[in-house]
Image (cartoon, rainbow, N blue to C red):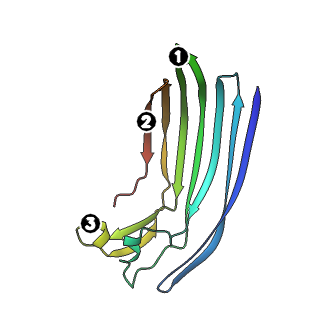
Amino acid sequence: DSVALTAGMRRDRYHTVYGQDDAAGWILSPNLQGQWQLTSHWQLFAGYGTSARGFGTMPVHFARNIQPNVTAPIKPERAQQQEAGIRLGQLQIAGLGLSADISYFKNSLRDFIIYQHGGSGGLGNRPVTSISNQAASITFAGVHSKLVLQGQQWSGELGFSQFTSRNLPLL
């Protein structure tokens, strides 16, 4: 049995100016991961992390089309990620390597930044008519599994994910 814990902290600073709107600040984004080696082949793992994105971070084709009268949100996006699972390490069976894992995950996003586009056509050519934060948190939760087989000259991977989502914005 062995246990490993890893912790981290990131400081994200943002400063953005849109016309008369000026938003600046910083956010601490902690994370924590752990592993517990149950046997030589079986391992439990779990992780938790946060991240942030200021509203000045956007695709270039959005930024060039922001209209002069658009006001920007003051709140940055915030995300939380959680995951826990079990992993089967490399087993040798009849000359083949076998490994697998299954995990549960949940990701939440609050103050999601929405860029509204007027007109028609591709997003790259449409004017950005408003920028806002979504009031409700967006959530993705589900299960991911993976099976890996490895031979002398080849390897193959089979994965499966299933998740549900809540409060996705209708753009």
The mark closer to the camera, 2 or 1, is: 1
Horizontal and vertical percent position of residue 122: 26, 66
Residue 83, percent across and down?
59, 40
Extreme-top residue of the structure = 94
Mark 1 or 3: in front is 1
Which residue was labeled with disc 2? 162
**Kind of residue at badge 3:** Gly
At 39% from the left and 85% from the top, the residue drawn is 68
At x 58%, y 48%, the residue is: 81
- Rendering coords of residue 119 (x, y %): 24, 72
Task: Tell me how far mark 2 sits from mark 1, CA to CA.
Answer: 32 Å
Residue at left offset 41%, top offset 53%:
168
Most distant residue in the front direction: 153
Quarter occupied by the C terminus: bottom left
Distance from the alpha carbon under mark 1 to that under mark 3: 52 Å
Residues tagged 3 and 2 counted as in contact (Cβ below 8 A)? no
Left/right of residue 65 with respect to residue 24 in the rendered view? left
Q: Which residue is mark 1?
A: 95
Q: Indicate the amino acid at tag 2.
A: Gln
Q: Which residue is mark 3?
A: 122
Q: Earlier in the sequence, mark 2 or mark 1?
A: 1
Query: Looking at the rendered structure, which numbered label has been put on residue 56?
Result: none
| Residue beneath the point at 65% across and 30% down | 44
Secondary structure, mark 1, is loop
